[in-house]
Amino acid sequence: MRILIIGAGQVGSSIAENLSESHKVVIMDIDPVRVSDLSYSYDVLAICGDGNNIKNLEEVGKIDLFLACTNDDEKNLIACESSKMIGDAFTVARVKNSVLFESWSRSKGSFGVDFMACSDRLISEAIIKITGTPAALDADYFADGKIQMAEFEINPNSFISNKTVLEADQFELLTFAAIITESEIIIPTGSTMILPGHRIVVIGTPESVKSFSTQLEPTTKKTQNIVLIGGSSIIAETASLFSSIKVNTTLITSGKDASLELAKKLPNTMVMCHDISDIRFLEAENINQSDLVVVHLSSDEKTLLISLLIKQLGVRRIVSIVNSGSYVSLFENVGIDVAVNPRELISEAIIGFTHQVNTEHIALLDSNRVELLEVEIGSDSNISGKTIQEISSSMPNLVLIGAIVRDEQAIAPRGDTTIKYGDHIVILTDVSVLDKVLQQL
Amino acid sequence: MNLRSNWKAALSLTGTILKWLAIALCIPLVVAVYFGDSIWPFVIPGAISLTLGLLFERIDPDPHMNLRDGFLMLVLAWVFIAFIGSFPYLISTFGTSSSLSIPINALFESVSGFTTTGATVIEDLSSPSYSKSILFWRQFTQWLGGMGIIVLALAIIPSLSSGGMRLLDAESPGPGVKKLTPKIAETARFLWIVYLGITFLEILALYGLHVLGLAPNMDFYNAVCHGMTTLASGGFSPAVRGIETFSAAVQWVIIPFMVASGTNFALFYKFMSDDKKVFLKDSEFKYYLLVIAALCAIFLGIFLTTGTSIGIQNDSTTISSFRSALFLTVSLITTTGYVNFDYTLLDLPIQYLILLAMFIGGSVGSTSCSIKILRWVIILKSVKSDIIKIIHPDAVVPVRFNNETLTESTIKQIHAFTLLFIFIFGISTILISLDSYRIGLNLSLLEAMGAVAATLGNFGPSFGQSGPMGTYLHFSTPSKLYMSGLMIAGRLEIFPLIVLFTRVFWKS
């Protein structure tokens, strides 16, 4: 595939690096210094030009995929629109502002954008995932949130430990997809034993996963109080997503006008205006009682110091949003529970999207040994019209159909369920056989 | 005092409105001709109105109005219209022993009409001194005053258009009245068309009941008369015992139209321009219905437990209690002032409740007066926000209404208005009491408070002698004049009138 990337910042260059192995990548930036740097570092064609200038775009010639990755939302939209004027490349835009994303979601394909990756939204969703199922080690959503995959560690006192899968599986619309042991990944059959120390991957509707997780560890209480520190758009987006799922959110920011604007935007969030480093204030507002604190301040250094200050108060979990990718591991080394880098997330989203055209969602489990894919069944699909039993006998060993979404409804995959055209299925597969599997679908 | 020269513009525009009042006077004239009544009560005021109008217009042939002149013009227009509106009463009762033959009484009745209050000084409506056409005029003044004379003027006088929004704001009861269309004249015209349309519907419904034999007393004349005063939330009735005269069916039909009169008319506009869910979405409308339901439940509970048998028609006691409770509630909240039974016969605590209910008011942008639901809700919300700030001193808690955040100054204005309303109520109660004491009239506290609340809140009937079946005739002349002022103040939401009494207003 010939890919044109507009913008050679952190996002653009990391995408270019990742895609250059298997694709022909052209990267365009206004800054000549960056351009020359890039052409020496990666195997890409780096050219100097403006993505909003249609003449520059024409000079690149025919392309299949157009990725607008500058840090300016409007420029990215104009670049996509311009690209549509001169060709039929598939366009992907990186945006920050979730308002733009919501407008685009109403009518996908508008602004000349075929796929939009919204960083504010991606981060807030990533944080929600961390808290949504508290016992889960990793959680991911498929088919517009109708299907959830989650990985749990089995404690010795858990109700399913030392039981067979058949005994443990009392949940409608929930599939035990895989059991991960120290050495291997087992696709369980009815007689497989679940032992303490194993990790179990379940796929099902969010409700069934939730009820499973509460039964697994009945003491785990739902994340109730979340404190967000900072006044960035990511913080605002996270607050509004959290309050939409009825979690108590408190937002603390300094700056009178900014706090008023945020308070207007967030009707269900308690907004406070105070100096964040004032430890007495943080104590008085019982920050240490909160279940999760998210910190994102104007500079990473501030974010780190405030995160550490809050950690010292005894908060259970802290998520820091770090602007510079190189700091991420540092944050986690000094005791911050999770450090999230917006640029990393957006690059991942765009790379993930480009990997496979009709693979809608990819979640990597356990250091890339198992892959979960969401696939829409096309009319020419090999498996359309077959039952699950037939499919599993014809496919390589490590394949499991974890969930099926038909007509917007999750249905439980059983051996005699027939896959139909238009279904969204979530499959679990070993990375080594991924390509084979995708061909067979 | 060095007066600003621009009062001329205000007077000139008042003249234009007076010219149109002469045309409005032709309608009762037609009624008079139809019933064979004397035509002079309408011809003479018409001629005076036209002459005055033309004279005033000559003061400033090319008027340009700014904000300050707008307030002056608003008050001038209302005063002159009320003044001329009293002439038909004076002329028709000239030489009789009727109370309306005394100028102050005629003025009180006219102000009470145009401000849609419904307080009366007529002792015996059935007396032959009151012709059908003069009683029609009494109803008609309320209908004109209901949607607002200035709104009507804006709809038909193009020269008012620029700066007219200020007038619309000042005259339409309540904050937050917004332009519905880009052109102000179009907005005003639309409001009047809705008003006219719903009035027409009610007349049809009431007359329909008569035709069906469900309302023997509701002839066409009465249907028109009551249609006009329901939508205006006025409360005048040509019938001696008000709505009590009419059957239960009539009372049921009037209730939804009273509810409509207390609804923000902008909602009707949005409903017609394809937003069918607007009534479900509007917070104020929901609170409005909630308040009606709650107050109705309280009244019903009281009526049923005390076994008060009031307003009984030929239906069962429970249903008739429910009807009376609902009718009273809706009449109180929309400040209409219709009564289907004499509530002064109820026990005192219930009358206290009625007095308090006069302070609630309907929605903004409706024809109802008093403090209004929106203000109460916003006050309660801002108090709630203050309480949160006491617990969390650094919390930023903006007050929201209908998904909009209100600015501090809006909230301050609402607090100021409500405080001023209650302050004026308190001061006026004392003034009226003292003045009545001066002429040897012993007024109970309930009667004094009731008279002020009913005039300032434009409800109409009060308690004791000036209850629903009584009159305000026994008050002294200064009291009546003062209460006329209260009615205009209440109708114009106090501030436009108050600013005229400030030194700042008159300084150039």
Image: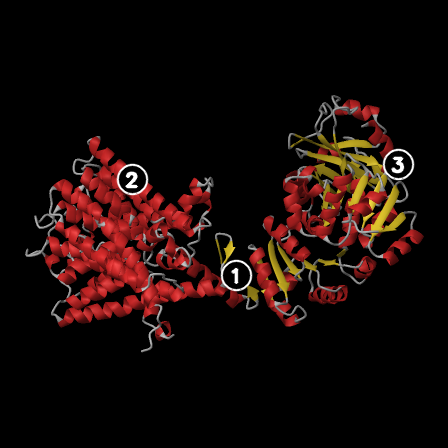
What is the x, y in percent for residue B138? 19, 50
State yes or no: discs 2 and 3 in contact (Cβ < 8 Å): no
Along the line of sight, the residue nearer the viewer: A85 or B14? B14
Q: CA distance from mark 3 to mark 1?
A: 56 Å
- Residue B410 visible in the picture: yes
Within 10 Å of disc 1 (Cα), the crowding (few <14, some 14-19, many 20+) is many
Along the line of sight, the residue nearer the viewer: B139 or A196? B139
The quadrant in which the N terminus of chain A is found is: top right
Q: Is residue B224 above or below residue A335?
A: above
Compared across the picture, whether A343 is left or right of B362 comes to right
**Subunit ID for the residue under disc 2:** B
Within 10 Å of disc 3 (Cα), the crowding (few <14, some 14-19, many 20+) is few
Q: Is residue A263 above or below residue A176?
A: below
What is the x, y in percent for residue A343? 78, 53
Q: Is residue A102 above or below residue A278?
A: above
- Residue marked by disc 1: B398
User: Which residue lies at the image location 15% right of the left edge and 54% below the top edge?
Assistant: B89
